[in-house]
């Protein structure tokens, strides 16, 4: 992976949650992009460099799972992390089959979410970032 700044696409219909995550990850040196739904996320993935996609499961227009399946057609190797307040075994299995990097339960802690994103970068790109 190049030495460029890692980019993270935060996709959630909750603007306050997106802004909170933006603050957390920009403090760690990430370039953050935001989308309010799956369709918007797909447009960003098509035209921007995105290293990791972080998205909510329940959004208008497309669910996180539907978005994940479509993103994998465009950028098959990009790690995608799904967040859900309604996490259950079926969703975890569906996400695994759709090739999600991981699935996290909301509410999520700062350490859980930053750990998952850093693990995704390390696994997909062998890129290590010092956490601040």
Image (spheres, rainbow, N blue to C red):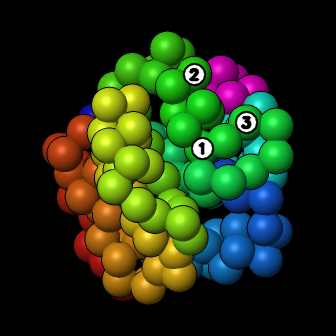
Q: CA distance from mark 3 to mark 2?
A: 10 Å
Of 96 and 53, nearer the camera is 96
56 is within the stretch colored magenta:
no
Q: Are marks 3 and 2 in contact (CB under 8 Å)?
A: yes
Which residue corresponds to the image point at 46% horizontal and 64% vertical from the top-left? 87
Which secondary structure lies at badge 3?
loop
44 is within the stretch colored magenta:
yes
Which comes before the other along the chain, label 3 or label 2?
Answer: 3
- Quarter of the image for the C terminus: give it: bottom left
Task: Say whether residue 6 is visible.
Answer: no
Which residue corresponds to the image point at 79% horizontal and 59% vertical from the top-left? 13
Q: Are marks 3 and 1 in contact (CB under 8 Å)?
A: yes
Magenta segment, prevailing SS (helix, strand or loop):
helix
Label 1: how many Cα within 10 Å (few below 14, some 14–19, many 20+): many
Rendered view: 44 above or below 72 = below
Label 3: how many Cα within 10 Å (few below 14, some 14–19, many 20+): some
Of 6 and 100, nearer the camera is 100
User: Which residue lies under the disc numbered 1?
Assistant: 64
Pinpoint residue 60: horizontal percent, then vertical percent.
82, 46
Rendered view: 45 above or below 112 = above
């Amino acid at each position: 992976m190049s030495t460029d700044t890692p980019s993270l696409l935060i996709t959630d219909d909750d603007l306050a949650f997106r802004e909170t995550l933006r603050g957390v990850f920009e403090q760690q040196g990430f370039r953050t992009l935001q989308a309010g739904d799956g369709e918007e996320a797909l447009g960003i993935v098509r035209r921007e460099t995105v290293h990791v996609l972080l998205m909510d499961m329940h959004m208008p227009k497309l669910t996180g799972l539907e978005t994940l399946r479509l993103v994998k057609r465009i950028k098959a190797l990009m790690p995608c992390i799904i967040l859900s307040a309604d996490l259950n075994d079926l969703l975890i299995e569906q996400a695994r089959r759709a090739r999600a990097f991981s699935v996290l339960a909301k509410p999520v802690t700062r350490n859980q979410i930053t750990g998952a994103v850093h693990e995704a970068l390390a696994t997909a790109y062998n890129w290590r970032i010092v956490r601040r």
